[in-house]
Image (spheres, rainbow, N blue to C red):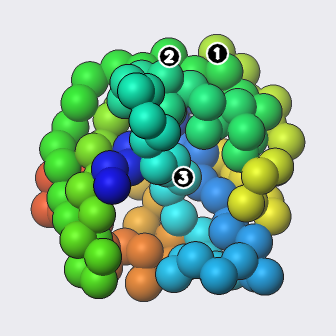
Amino acid sequence: MVAVSGIVNYNGKILIGKKRSDSEKFLAGCWHIPGETIEKNESDETALKRGFMQEANLEIKVGKYICSSLTPTSKKEIKWYECFSETDKVIPGSDLEYVEWVLKKDVVYYCDKKAVSLWPQEIKNYFS
C-alpha cells in the first residue's frame, strides 16, 4: 500500500490537520501533515487532490515531489509532495477534527511529536 502526504502552502503558511480522536489510526487525536492512501489505478496527484478535498474541502495544485519514506510499523510507503492552495478557506472533514494554517517555521512545533518523529530528514529539512 502506498500513501501520499501534501505540504500545502498558502501565503507562507502550511496546512496541518488534527486526526479525529475516535479514529483507530496511529495518529488519532494528533496534529500532523495530512495525507491519503492511494486507491487502485489512482495517480499520486489525483490521490492528493481527492484527499485534500475530502479532509479540508480544499482544492490544491500539486507541486514537486520531495521524497519517500516508510512507516515504521506497516512499512507503507509515503510519498511527500509540496502543494499549493489559492485560498485559506478550509473546512475539516473525513477523518480530521480540525484544520489550521500555521507559519512554515512553526509547523514542527504544532505537529505532534509522534508525527514529527516519522518524518524523513528531507521533510525535517523543509521546515528548518
Q: Which quarter of the rendered picture does the C terminus lie within?
A: bottom left
Residue 5 appears in the figure? no
Residue at x-position 73% and y-position 60%? 95
Q: CA distance from mark 3 to mark 2?
A: 15 Å
Where on the picture, by quarter, is residue 74? bottom left
Q: Which of marks 2 and 3 precedes in the sequence?
A: 3
Q: Are marks 2 and 1 in contact (CB under 8 Å)?
A: yes
Where on the picture, by quarter, is residue 87? top right
Q: Which residue is mark 1?
A: 86
Q: Which of marks 1 and 3 precedes in the sequence?
A: 3
Residue at x-position 65% and y-position 58%? 17
Q: Secondary structure at mark 1?
A: loop
Q: CA distance from mark 3 to mark 1?
A: 18 Å
Q: Which quarter of the rendered picture does the N terminus lie within?
A: bottom left
Q: Which residue is mark 2?
A: 61
Q: Dot 2, crowdedness within 10 Å: few (<14), some or many (≥20)?
A: some
Q: Secondary structure at mark 3?
A: loop
Position in image of residue 2 (x %, y %): 32, 50
Q: Which of marks 1 and 2 precedes in the sequence?
A: 2
Q: Dot 1, crowdedness within 10 Å: few (<14), some or many (≥20)?
A: few
Position in image of residue 26 (x %, y %): 51, 81
Q: Which residue is mark 3?
A: 34
**Which of labels 2 and 1 is toward the front?**
2
Q: CA distance from mark 2 to mark 1?
A: 9 Å
Quick check: 90 left or right of 128? right
Callout 3, which amino acid? Pro
Position in image of residue 7 (x %, y %): 43, 41
